Amino acid sequence: RYLVTSTLPHLRSTGDLAKKKTYPALWGLYRDGLLPENTKFFGYARSALTIEEIKENCRPFMNVKSEEETNYQNFWRNHFYVQGTYTQLTDFHKLNEVLCSYEPENGANRIFYLALPPSVFEVVTTNLRKSCVSKKGWTRIIVEKPFGHDDASSEKLSLHLASLFSEDQVFRIDHYLGKEMVQNLMILRFGNGLFSPTWNRLFVASVQITFKEPFGTEGRGGYFDKFGIIRDVMQNHLLQILSLVAMEKPPSIHPDDIRNEKVKVLKCIKPIKKEDVVLGQYVGNPNGKTDEEKKGYLDDPTVPNDSITPTYCTALLKIDNERWEGVPFILRCGKALNERKAVIRIQYNDVPGDIFDKQCKRNELVIRVQPNEAVYVKMMTKTPGMSFDMEETELDLTYSNRYKV
Ligand code: BG6
């Protein structure tokens, strides 16, 4: 029994998901022996492409060590590509025939990963349901964002998917949940007696969740401009992090229990006021070192000249519940900024009853999601030596020092 993964890559664009993320991730899973033996990968898209071309497009992003070269070539032997439209059912019959021709007699499981323009989600899932469901194994559908653009459209899409597949067949993906440090949040919070008692408004002054990227849209403006930074990054990645930081302890680590706690805390967030939001759009830096740095958002040919879509947002969120009332949650995200960084800062209150002449800085628990994962606590300590001076230092768990990652 093997598993058939069918990816639908946009391989044409330059900053695309398939070559930057999907294929490298599949390679990583294959290399580390995490996939069932005989897994086959099928790309499906409108462009006329060969596996050789896909392989070449992906190469700069695959991170292959010289000693892995043979295994890497074997990985590509399991790849196939089918060209077809998103709208014609006959093309999906064709895809199904190709899939069947590679499956053993007793069938196979199929995962369909839909990295697609949102405008075709509905027609593609309808076509998949009609012609590509595995007859003898299970079928799963993975949906990438954007999952609609507002409440009504995401509800519509949910209802549509529910009419075709059962909920446990549908996976709405947020790749931030796969990040080591995001996964670590539950363990840090609920696996340490140290943090739990102080994880509330009596001790915490503020929570800051920041996402920064040093590059702009890089030709992805066609997609980005319709959605903007809030829908692209904040409402998904940053809110997932916020809910893991702020939710109550779930009754167990079962996914449904975690989901329920996240929903509860999200329901406690008050509607955001206009004055609590700062929006921005990046402009070119004439002194930039690369052409990319010199270009502003509006210089991207895929962005309309008069676009006012935000590429930067800071928002102040307030969680109106017993644990967090009065604690500001500050979410920040932006493209074309000074560095690549995703970080969570839990800032503690000033030390009450100060005896050090206001020299103490606030403690901070910092969880650096990327790059160079780390958990550290900023704390005051005596400067070693004969004096009684103090300084801020860190209790530091930097992963690259502690773990072979
Ligand atoms: C994606 C956004 O979801 O996340 C991109 O659409 C963004 O705009 C990307 O660049 C960031 O992911 P990562 O894993 O590189 O931080």
Image (cartoon, rainbow, N blue to C red):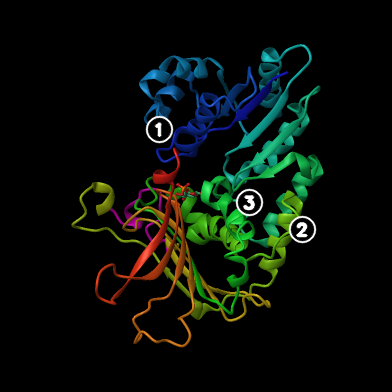
Q: Secondary structure at mark 2?
A: loop
- The circle drawn on residue 335 is none
Point 62% across, 28% down: residue = 6
In the picture as drawn, the residue positioned furthest to the front comes out as 386
Q: Which residue is mark 2?
A: 251
Task: State the separation of the CA atoms marked 2 and 1.
Answer: 40 Å
Point 73% across, 25% down: residue = 109
Of the residues tagged 3 and 1, which is closer to the observer? 1
Q: Which badge, 2 or 1, comes first in the chain's sequence?
A: 1
Q: Which residue is mark 3?
A: 147
Query: Given the image, on which type of amino acid does mark 3 rest?
Result: Phe
Q: Secondary structure at mark 3?
A: loop
Q: Which badge, 3 or 2, comes first in the chain's sequence?
A: 3
Q: Which residue is mark 1?
A: 61
Q: Secondary structure at mark 1?
A: helix
Q: Is residue 107 visible?
A: yes
Point 55% across, 77% down: residue = 203
Query: Given the image, on which type of amino acid does mark 2 rest?
Result: Pro
Query: Given the image, on which type of amino acid does mark 1 rest?
Result: Phe
Is label 3 in contact with label 2 (beta carbons under 8 Å)?
no
Residue in front for this viewpoint, 232 or 243: 243
Sort mark 2 into few (<14), some (14-19) or many (20+) by Cα contacts within 10 Å: few
Point 39% across, 45% down: residue = 401
**Residue 149 percent coordinates (x, y):** 61, 57
In the picture, which quadrant includes the N terminus?
top right
Q: Which residues are magenta?
A: 295-308
Q: Is residue 301 magenta?
A: yes
